[in-house]
Amino acid sequence: MAQQEPVTSTVEDGIAVIRIANPPVNALSAAVRGGLAREAGAAAANPAVRAVVVTAEGRTFIAGADITEFGKPPVPPTLPEAIAALEDLSKPVVAAINGAALGGGLEVALGCHARVAAPSARLGLPEVKLGILPGAGGTQRLPRLIGAVPALKLMTAGDPVSAAEAKTLGILDEVAEDVVAAARALALRLADGARPTPASAAANTGDREAFEAAAAAMAKKGAENPSIAACIDAVRAAFDKPFEEGMAIERAHFLRLRDDPRSKALRHAFFAERAAARIPGLPKGTQPRPVARAAVIGGGTMGGGIAMSFANAGIPVTLIETSEENLQRGLERVAGNYATSVKRGSLTEEARAKRMGLIEGRVGLEAAAGADVVVEAVFEEMGLKKEIFGKLQEIAKPGAVLATNTSYLDVDEIAASTSRPGDVLGMHFFSPANVMKLLEVVRGAKTAPDALATAVEVGRKLAKVPVVSGVCHGFIGNRMLARRTSQAERLLIEGALPEEVDAALNAFGFRMGPFAMGDLAGLDIGWRIRQATGKKAPVADALVEAGRLGQKTKRGYYDYSGDGRTGTPDPEVRALIERVSAEQGVTRRSIPQQEILERLLYPMINEGARILEEGIAARAGDIDTVWLNGYGWPAGTGGPMFYADGVGLPGIVARLRDFAGSSGDDTLAPAALLVRLAEEGGSFAALDEKAAA
Ligand code: CAA
């Protein structure tokens, strides 16, 4: 299909308006860069043109570089060259920012001589989130325009700011509803006056000492995150070096970081998250059902957090409990969470009042009658859930989506307790539900396509990252986690200590290892599940039976008798573990960190492969999205399946065979899919690409 020319211009009343139309987000593909340089040249050459306005079609101004081009051979002109063509014009150039200006998009605007944005526009430099740094002059122009400290903050945080904030920062000259009209007027005024100073020649870097203090405060982050270190280095050059030299420093950092595996992993995560939003197998034209009101059954920590998620998204929600007392407790917890946010300054009093106003507390299931989506968040007990869904079939209005927040139970069995199984699915939130991004949407055998589309759409409205899972014990995330948990326990019995196991995962990039995590969550949770399912974990069981439930009892795998939050290794735990080893007839050995890591991660990857071959997850990227957003998998390695490709599947298969052989544990034997891919020289990424084609 012939590509339509993405950059065009029209001349009217002495002004050339250059328009970018490159859907969906006006990314700066080679054709857009070439078009910008070409139209800048045409404006320079046309004596009828006195000034230039650069704007774009659609919801965004420009969402930045075209990330899909990053792995490919470069096509000229580079973005810095295209921007220079605009900035070097002797006629004034004004950016009319109609929507999001991100990354290279903001850099294009910084290359213009002045900037006007729509009130709804958001401006930012999100490059650090992709493992790079602004690579088209952002690190040189922005500090010269608004000062080095605010510029450094903006680019190291990576979060966009509103047009109003950008105006206060000095990035924008004006905020206007009709951006093009306002930009035209400004351009004409500039054409009548002296030529404005381009950002590259501005001298507003600010106080050097304040910059060094800000840089020093980021030193720790910089040591962990090469993008942040590079931003600091490049912005420092804006003080010390002429513009062109600063540009060369920025470019060198950009190219080095772009080709680093870390950036590849972060780009994978970006696209995997977006691919996960595409639900396979939905009939064409399936539309989500309208959702104006929600109900949450169960006012515990989880239910309260889910209700907050709805209120935060502006959706009125009824929080339902069985008694006035439980209801009050639930509502108080919610109110307390919001009050804390106000105290911390992350929420305004006005927003707090509005959100609380959207949450209505009621006693009795009948209160679910008005809801378009009902989320059940009661105890993990099949009998109770069936009873509730049985009653909901009468109470909930026709077409309401009936969701269970179960984290393990069989959604099909729950659906079978109603006469309307097509409305039933799982919406598995992660704790704390008002904070965590991941939402597993569990598709039952009888879930109607539009009910599924509704749950995914609701997830997006709640600012979650929805990933569709099939029905199985633990769905995608917890099913894989169970493999890690059982290996962590085995490692203790074979000779490792909790701090060694946790240290291996910390070194890999997890903020918390399995034992520190268990202590935080409470060890009685897993114990209760094991009791219910007849499973055993000798060390974990012995801890719980000794009254060591984790942080809440000040003792778990670690001792928390200090500040209650920092765990230190406990000789009592060591003795307990050694006793279990002896009881099991195991001679303890010292286990190297690399082996600990492989024992924890490879069985998870193996389970991920089973999840894929069973069709529980549609894509390997979906599994990565689950782990990156719900379980703290370190973003710089792209998630378990992306990481597996990087390690090499044949090596993983060989190690799994070793583990299965030495332990006699068949669950460790490599999955058929993993073996096949390893033998064919395939990869999970290639598998996903094939599925998408
Ligand atoms: N390059 C290529 N494709 C992009 C893209 C980009 N920069 N940004 C978005 N897309 C694609 C998405 O993959 C998605 O494609 P599919 O529909 O095929 O899944 C489509 O555009 C729409 O994106 P979203 O689903 O994210 O749409 P949204 O409306 O929710 O969000 C957005 C829009 C805020 C612009 C968001 O897409 C976004 O944050 N994009 C990335 C912005 C970014 O990181 N820019 C920096 C790029 S690096 C850079 O610019 C380096 C430099 O200095 C030269």
Image (spheres, rainbow, N blue to C red):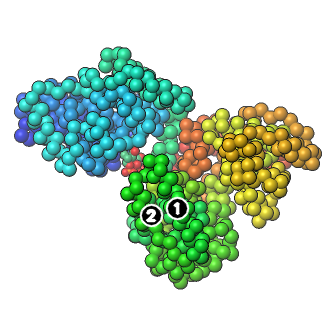
Circle 1: residue type = Val
Across and down, in percent, residue 584 comes to: 91, 48
Whether 266 is drawn above or below 200: the answer is: below
In this figure, which residue is indicated by the disc labeled 1?
Answer: 334
Identify the residue at image location x=43%, y=52%. Answer: 347
Mark yes or no: residue 615 visible.
no
Question: Ligand 1: which quarter?
Answer: top left
In this figure, which residue is indicated by the disc labeled 2?
Answer: 356
Disc 1 under 8 Å from ligand 1? The reply is: no
Q: Residues within 10 Å of mark 1 (few under 14, many from 20)?
A: many
Q: Residues within 10 Å of mark 2 (few under 14, many from 20)?
A: some
Across and down, in percent, residue 92 comes to: 15, 31
Circle 2: residue type = Met
Q: Please give the count of numbered marks on the rendered protein.
A: 2
Q: Secondary structure at mark 2?
A: helix
Identify the residue at image location x=30%, y=36%. Answer: 169
Identify the residue at image location x=70%, y=53%. Answer: 552
Quarter of the rendering containing residue 419: bottom right
**Do the residues bearing badges 2 and 1 touch, measured as CB atoms within 8 Å?**
yes
Left or right position of 289 against 630: left
Across and down, in percent, residue 527 comes to: 76, 58
Q: CA distance from mark 2 to mark 1?
A: 8 Å
Seen from the viewer's position, the closer of residues 622 and 503 is 503
Whether 182 is drawn above or below 219: the answer is: below
* 2 or 1: tag closer to the N-terminus: 1
Mark yes or no: residue 305 visible.
yes
Seen from the viewer's position, the closer of residues 541 and 61 is 541
